Amino acid sequence: MSTATKIGIWMDHQTANLIEFTTDPLATKTIHSKFTHSVKESSLHRGENKMHAKEKHQQAEFYKAIGAMIHHYESVILFGPTDAKTELFNILTADQKFSKIRIQVKQTDKMTENQQHAFVRDFFIPSISLGSRHPV
């Protein structure tokens, strides 16, 4: 990712789509959790406690990978349909190295990539008040 200072992250517990807010066309970089359905099934065969421990460890790695990607941004919007964004927000705000980053959280539904790009664009572009528009 380049010199952008703002980034939007649509996420659930399996996937994080990182979308830099730039003047160029928006592009998505995706990070996937390693805790897949097949990993869950194989861990479950060894016991439920082992499965939960593996899930917790791999979720922590997933969140750490996202944190590593956003540490140089000034403003971050976390959005998506699950509690993953709130879990990541809590981890980031507890870590002093993210203290200068403005991080916000918004609840959204599942979205297509185009909808995610539109959400990021609309979030970071300040609204134009109707009174300041010039007639065409």
Image (spheres, rainbow, N blue to C red):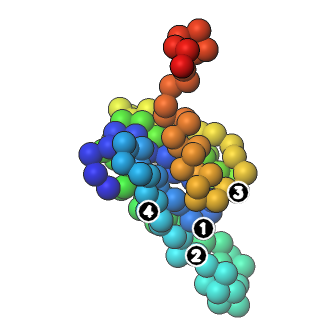
Residue 110 tag number: 3
Answer few, some or many: residues within 10 Å of disc 4's Cα (few below 14, many 20 plus, some between 14 and 19): few
The residue depicted at 53 percent of the width and 60 percent of the height is: 16
Which mark is nearer the camera, 4 or 1? 4
- Residue 50 percent coordinates (x, y): 63, 79
Which mark is nearer the camera, 1 or 3? 3
Disc 3 secondary structure class: loop
- Mark toward the start of the polypeptide (2 vs 4): 4
Which mark is nearer the camera, 2 or 4? 4
Quote the CA–CA distance across marks 3 and 4: 17 Å
Quote the CA–CA distance across marks 1 and 3: 13 Å
Q: Nearer the viewer, residue 38 or 95?
A: 38
Disc 4 secondary structure class: strand
Residue denoted by label 4? 29
Answer few, some or many: residues within 10 Å of disc 3's Cα (few below 14, many 20 plus, some between 14 and 19): some
- Mark toward the start of the polypeptide (3 vs 2): 2
Residue denoted by label 1? 14
- Mark toward the start of the polypeptide (3 vs 4): 4
Disc 2 secondary structure class: loop
Quote the CA–CA distance across marks 4 and 1: 14 Å
Q: Nearer the viewer, residue 73 or 60?
A: 73
Answer few, some or many: residues within 10 Å of disc 1's Cα (few below 14, many 20 plus, some between 14 and 19): some
Question: Which residue, as the protein is rendered here, is positioned at the far left?
Answer: 3
Q: As drawn, is 14 to the left or to the right of 68?
A: right
Q: Are marks 3 and 4 in contact (CB under 8 Å)?
A: no
Residue denoted by label 2? 35
Q: Are marks 2 and 1 in contact (CB under 8 Å)?
A: yes
Amino acid marked by disc 1: Gln
Quote the CA–CA distance across marks 2 and 4: 19 Å
Q: As drawn, is 68 to the left or to the right of 114?
A: left
Quote the CA–CA distance across marks 2 and 1: 7 Å
